[in-house]
């Protein structure tokens, strides 16, 4: 059962963040509205929200997921792979210290972005990407092992057009992974039932399972239909402004 989420609204500097999307500049007012609806949806799904103050020093700081890995029992501060984002970790540390008795951290030369880490019950997938390096993945795997949790490292560097592992697949719960075509046959996913997103709906592979609800980005009717068919209670959210900055649903919160 998830009960809490930490979020941070986008700041005035939001449009100066990192992006490869080529979808134009985000409109801050609309991003703030979409963020408010995101928070309201998490609340409807049963989560209490801790909203950190917007932080204009770090344009990408609304993508708070990348700064930590959180579980029911402990948290791990990451070391984001993009130099421009390194300082974001220090700005979430106090909130995590308040919420967790056990706090670990990734150390140099390791780098890990939270977006490269996907929890599926007691197992973690750790993606190697332009942001998460082998030293970081190995450290994380060791920390998880000491906490009694298993992990597998999945090399995402050959999978074109994705930033993070969770841009390619996320855990739906119930032994099911939602994945883009390019990764659906990967051996690491073999123990799971893979729900493939249709061509042209790749962005929707990043979804949130929040207690009995599944939250997907608006505008992906085929995945929506498939999830309806599997009898999930589906909520949709317009993510247009975050997508312009390479962000998706999971990126906007730390959930535990
Ligand atoms: C970045 O490039 O770091 C941000 N503009 C987007 C981060 C998205 N985060 C995520 O997928 N967890």
Image (spheres, rainbow, N blue to C red):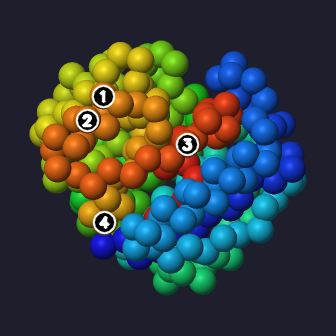
Residue 180 image offset from top left, x and y in percent: 34, 25
**The N terminus lies in which quarter of the figure?**
bottom left
Residue 55 image offset from top left, x and y in percent: 81, 59
Residue at the disc numbered 3 = 238
Pair 1/4: label in front: 1
* Proximity of marks 1 and 4: CB atoms separated by less than 8 Å: no
Q: Secondary structure at mark 2?
A: helix
Residue 88 image offset from top left, x and y in percent: 73, 56
**Residue 251 or 85: which is nearer the viewer?**
251
Residue at the disc numbered 1 = 222
- Identify whether 94 is placed above or below 243: below
Q: Residue at x 22, y 35 (%)?
A: 226
Residue 150: image quadrant is: bottom left
Label 3 beta carbon less than 8 Å to ligand 1: no
Q: Earlier in the sequence, mark 1 or mark 3?
A: 1
Residue at the disc numbered 2 = 225
Q: Residue at x 71, y 58 (%)?
A: 9
**The C terminus lies in which quarter of the figure?**
bottom left
Residue 31 image offset from top left, x and y in percent: 71, 47
Q: Secondary structure at mark 1?
A: helix
Q: Earlier in the sequence, mark 4 or mark 3?
A: 4
Q: Secondary structure at mark 3?
A: loop
Label 2 beta carbon less than 8 Å to ligand 1: no
Q: Secondary structure at mark 4?
A: loop
Residue at the disc numbered 4 = 211
Task: Measure the C-alpha gap from mark 4 to mark 3.
Answer: 20 Å
């Amino acid at each position: 059962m998830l009960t809490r989420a930490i979020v941070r609204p986008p700041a005035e500097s939001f449009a100066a963040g990192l992006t490869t999307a080529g979808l134009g500049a985000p409109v801050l007012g609309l991003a703030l509205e979409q963020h408010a609806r995101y928070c309201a949806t998490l609340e409807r799904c049963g989560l209490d929200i801790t909203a950190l103050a917007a932080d204009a020093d770090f344009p990408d700081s609304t993508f708070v997921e990348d700064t930590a890995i959180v579980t029911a029992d402990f948290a791990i501060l990451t070391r984001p792979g993009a130099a421009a984002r390194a300082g974001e970790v220090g700005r979430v540390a106090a909130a995590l210290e308040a919420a967790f008795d056990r706090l670990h951290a990734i150390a140099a030369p390791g780098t890990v972005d939270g977006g490269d880490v996907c929890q599926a019950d007691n197992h973690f997938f750790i993606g190697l990407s332009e942001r998460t390096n082998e030293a970081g993945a190995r450290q994380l795997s060791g920390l998880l092992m000491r906490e009694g949790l298993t992990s597998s490292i999945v090399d995402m560097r050959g999978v074109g057009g994705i930033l993070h592992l969770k841009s390619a697949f996320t855990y739906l719960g119930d032994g099911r992974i939602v994945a883009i075509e390019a990764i659906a046959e990967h051996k690491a996913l073999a123990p799971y039932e893979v729900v493939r997103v249709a061509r042209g709906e790749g962005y929707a592979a990043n979804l949130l399972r929040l207690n009995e609800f599944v939250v997907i980005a608006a505008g992906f009717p085929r995945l929506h239909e498939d999830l309806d068919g599997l009898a999930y209670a589906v909520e949709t959210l317009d993510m247009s402004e975050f997508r312009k900055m390479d962000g998706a649903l999971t990126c906007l919160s730390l959930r535990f």
